[in-house]
Image (cartoon, rainbow, N blue to C red):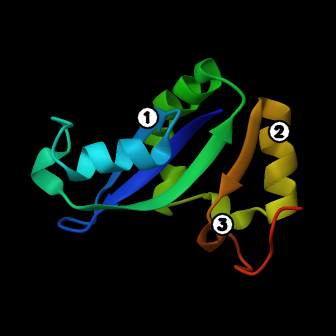
């Protein structure tokens, strides 16, 4: 299983998007300063992650999230994931080849859970 993750810097509050097959290891690498692109902004908290069926899908989504249009989905500046229901989003993402979006704060009702 591969994941696209969104970390948020506790220093400047800006997000960082990446992909990995081990979220906990990768977050630890970011927070220990082993990642050049983020070492000046540590520590990071894990804000959200999306499980993808394979590495190709994870990298595809990571690259999309790094585009100007993709940033709208997790920054909440315009149309965002918050406008979808949990069930509707999970069905749409499954159709696109992703397994789940896991962050209840992205949704209107934070107590809804994927079944």
Query: Residue at 68% across / 52% down in the picture?
Result: 101
Query: Residue at 16% across / 55% down in the picture?
Result: 41
Mark 1 crowdedness (10 Å alpha carbons): few <14, some 14-19, many ≥20: few
Secondary structure state at the residue bearing disc 1? loop
Q: Taking 10 as reference, is 63 above or below it?
A: above
Q: Which residue is mark 2?
A: 94
On residue 67, which mark appears? 1
Residue 23: give x, y in percent of width and height: 48, 45
Query: Residue at 53% across / 40% down in the picture?
Result: 4
Query: Residue at 45% across / 51% down in the picture?
Result: 6
Secondary structure state at the residue bearing disc 2? helix
Q: How many marks?
A: 3
Q: Taking 96 as reference, is 89 above or below it?
A: below
Front residue of this view, candidates 106 and 35? 35
Is 110 situated left or right of 34 in this image?
A: right
Q: CA distance from mark 1 to mark 3?
A: 19 Å
Q: Which residue is mark 3?
A: 82
Mark 2 crowdedness (10 Å alpha carbons): few <14, some 14-19, many ≥20: some
Labels 1 and 3: the sequence-earlier one = 1
Residue 82: give x, y in percent of width and height: 65, 66
Residue 26: give x, y in percent of width and height: 38, 42
Front residue of this view, candidates 29 and 44? 29
Q: Residue 12 falls in which quadrant of the image?
A: bottom left
């Amino acid at each position: 299983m591969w994941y696209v993750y969104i970390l948020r810097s506790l220093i400047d509050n800006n997000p960082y998007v990446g992909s990995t097959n081990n979220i906990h290891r990768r977050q630890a690498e970011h927070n220990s300063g082993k990642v050049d692109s983020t070492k000046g902004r540590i520590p990071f908290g894990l804000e959200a992650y999306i499980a993808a069926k394979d590495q190709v899908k994870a990298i595809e989504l990571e690259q999309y999230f790094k585009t100007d249009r993709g940033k709208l989905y997790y920054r909440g500046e315009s149309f965002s994931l918050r406008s979808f229901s949990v069930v509707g989003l999970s069905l749409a993402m499954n159709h696109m080849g992703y397994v789940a979006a896991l962050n209840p704060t992205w949704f209107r009702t934070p107590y809804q859970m994927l079944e």
